[in-house]
Image (tube, coloured by chain):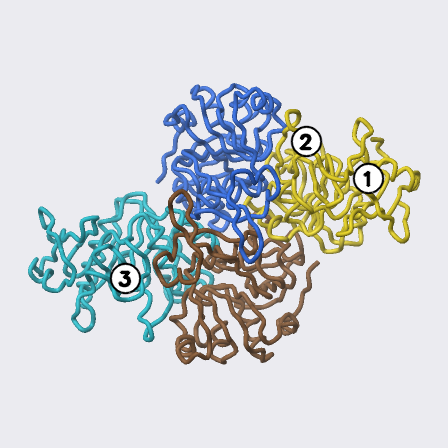
Chain colours: A blue, B brown, C yellow, D cyan
Amino acid sequence: MKRICTAKEAVQDVRDGASIMVGGFMCCGGPSGLMDALLEKGVKDLTLICNDAGLPDKGIGKLVVAGRVKHLIASHIGLNPAAGQKMHSGEMKVELVPQGTLAERIRAAGAGLGGVLTPTGLGTEVEKGKRIVEVDGKQFLLETPLRADFAMLSANEADRYGNAYVAKSARNFNPIMAMASDRVIVEAARVVEPGQIDPDRVNIPCVFVTDVVRGGRHG
Amino acid sequence: MKRICTAKEAVQDVRDGASIMVGGFMCCGGPSGLMDALLEKGVKDLTLICNDAGLPDKGIGKLVVAGRVKHLIASHIGLNPAAGQKMHSGEMKVELVPQGTLAERIRAAGAGLGGVLTPTGLGTEVEKGKRIVEVDGKQFLLETPLRADFAMLSANEADRYGNAYVAKSARNFNPIMAMASDRVIVEAARVVEPGQIDPDRVNIPCVFVTDVVRGGRHG
Amino acid sequence: MAEDKRVRIARRIARELPDNSLVNLGIGMPTLVADYLPKDKTILLHSENGFIGLGPQPEAGKEDLDLVNAGGKPVTMIPGGCYFDSAMSFAIIRGGHLDVTVLGALEVDEEGNLANYMIPGKMVPGMGGAMDLVVGAKKVIISMEHVNKNGASKILPKCTLPLTARKEVDLIVTELAVIRVTPQGLVLEEVAEDSSVEEVVSKTAAKLKMAPQIGRF
Amino acid sequence: MAEDKRVRIARRIARELPDNSLVNLGIGMPTLVADYLPKDKTILLHSENGFIGLGPQPEAGKEDLDLVNAGGKPVTMIPGGCYFDSAMSFAIIRGGHLDVTVLGALEVDEEGNLANYMIPGKMVPGMGGAMDLVVGAKKVIISMEHVNKNGASKILPKCTLPLTARKEVDLIVTELAVIRVTPQGLVLEEVAEDSSVEEVVSKTAAKLKMAPQIGRF
């Protein structure tokens, strides 16, 4: 059985400087309650790994606006002007990663791969500082695994074993981030007993999850 | 809309020497109707990529017994004695691949990766002839993508767009093989209209599928 | 750009989409193509945040918080769509399973190089899925205004901004012209009905070859 | 081996499994461990063909064609299990998410090397998921007879058969002994109640260090 707790309890072990993967795509499928709990806790110098910088008044975006993020690894920051400002002022380091490469790097960490070879980014700024590996006469960038101390995810339903179901386009990065972090906290609108989620619909297998929090966008 | 046809029609373009990925795990989730159609068609010198060599009287196993397979790429051949015999006699070439590496190599082809780095197989026979790549001081085998001319898969339901749902442990290799082949034929117990499969339960997205055949283990 | 010119671009691109194809439309002007899909073809739209079967905007009050497009805006799904996670979504894009991607551009050049994700020191929204889409899709169509805000050509001999990808663009559609990228360079294939070959050439910094027959659209 | 000795091995291994853990049991003797899981702990079983929550065999006539174990035999799923494809199943194994794997062996040696998938020219069933399991699982427990059919030790100074993996074995449980693999070599920790240190040492080709206190099981 996994720990069932409040958002405040779930984030209590997050220290200044921690790395956190945050599920969601433009805040759809993002753990808003956990983001608020982090904001309230006051931790800073965070490394956040997320598809995007969110919106200024929503989810992960609030942490960016509040200056809690030292390093942001994302594919897109255009919908949160504070992210661009802090990047230009040097207050926040931003590492822009192609979205598909971001997904593969996270999955690689979760799947125990030492890296993956991709043509995406060849001949662009993304190539800088990376090894190029040739296979069958074609060139690829060697992209390395991306792990974090925490994953903070959102789901529509989770059971006490940690199995979770994320509906529709809210699924996005949630399942792969669950694979690649030491502590995996799922904020679920409904917390149910084992067996209540159709086992063919589970898209975050229980094994990855350490904590379940009731709440979030549907809560 | 995808082609809806019989098993016989679906295999008509398979020529001697073709490479075919076959879904299923010890025949669970394997396309038995398509295997029978291949047997009847009489094609030979096939390269089959499959988790295992099946059972002597079932699915892919019948093709092995009938001597239609020139090259078998699989993780396990122990439940079909004919496979071991033909390997030892030299009649059939067998390439044994760790099951997880087999899955990643197929997925890599489907996901456009030039290869993946894995520690599985280091210091074993699997290492032979492969490049070793070091990342952060750790050694990994570079495993390359595995593609085929055809994928022959099994599903419980498929719709006319090609979306398919494979239930329970029948899922196994079916979704990833769908990603890595030029022609993807799904043998489905039920063929339904688009919209009739819950879009969160689809585990073979329509885009990969070229042909749908009614039939199979539940048909 | 005036609405009728945006519609002209969208209609023209819609005619490029083959039957039984999967297409990804970028945020902004490319999205408009969805309104002009040919009714006699099966064209499914891919949304890189995780589904196939992107449908129109929902009616007001019928928004579903769990169903948005890649711009984060509420949308619907048509019958026969399916959901997946980001790894599968980009496996579809990067594995060569997407037939067409339609994207905007800051600059395109004679080699088919594309710059569309940043202006250093000024605008750095990030590449999102653009680098993956452009490298992975079978066909890359650029939907854009022919010139920038200052009236300067966006079609150049050589891109000056950081590239999104090298040599991946196949077709450029603007309010003035349809231009194909070939190994021999850019070929002007069609000119807008209210424009002329002269106007297109004068507003294009890159060298244009003329197609044997130049159509109208 | 007599049934009671097989049960002894299974019971002993079951005691090694921690609370809230995910465990994969190999086909054959390791499967027997499932019958002796401690009732006061939450231990979920992983089946590498694609699910968590492996339950007992179904009653005759209640088999589900879509639900088999990694040996292809009909099984059931307990409430709270979940299904996934082979890529995810092995991501769980290879990504370090599996707490314990229990496997049989042909040979194990002083460095924790394991040979369990082939005898060249004789028996080549293939490694199946064994190479992935042994490299990926946090803890590797070997469940096997102490000696082979000819009475020769299966615990050697150095494996002679092709390896399944290098230096991955953590614990060896046989009908005679519990032996831990440490950086200093093999340590005899427990001896079966009907055996003796002398018998274990005489039937083990590898060098055994003695634990400070040798238990009984």
Disc 2 residue type (three-letter): Gly
Q: Residue at x 26, y 44 (%)?
A: D40
In which quadrant is the N terminus of chain D drawn? bottom left
In the rendered image, residue B181, in percent from the top left (x then y), is placed at 59, 61
Q: Is residue D205 above or below residue A57?
A: below
- Which of the two discs, 2 and 1, labels the residue nearer the N terminus? 2
Q: Nearer the viewer, residue D130 or C52?
A: D130
- Mark 2–mark 3 Cα distance, whole angstroms, equals 60 Å
Q: Nearer the viewer, residue B219 or D117?
A: D117
Question: What residue did someone put label 2 on?
Answer: C61
Q: Residues within 10 Å of mark 1 (few under 14, many from 20)?
A: many
Q: Residue at x 62, y 74 (%)?
A: B15
Given this view, does label 1 or label 3 mark the residue nearer the observer? Answer: 1
Q: Nearer the viewer, residue D88 or D108?
A: D108
Q: Does C212 sit left or right of A154 as displayed?
A: right
Can you tell which mark lies on residue D104?
3
Q: Residues within 10 Å of mark 3 (few under 14, many from 20)?
A: many
Q: Secondary structure at mark 1?
A: loop
Can you tell which mark lies on residue C174?
1
Given this view, does label 2 or label 3 mark the residue nearer the observer? Answer: 3
Same-chain status of marks 2 and 1: yes
Disc 1 residue type (three-letter): Thr
Disc 3 residue type (three-letter): Gly
In which quadrant is the C terminus of chain D drawn? bottom left
Q: Does B210 sit left or right of C10 as displayed?
A: left
Q: Does D68 sit left or right of A59 as displayed?
A: left
- Mark 2–mark 1 Cα distance, whole angstroms, equals 36 Å
- Mark 1–mark 3 Cα distance, whole angstroms, equals 66 Å
Q: Nearer the viewer, residue A166 or C60?
A: A166
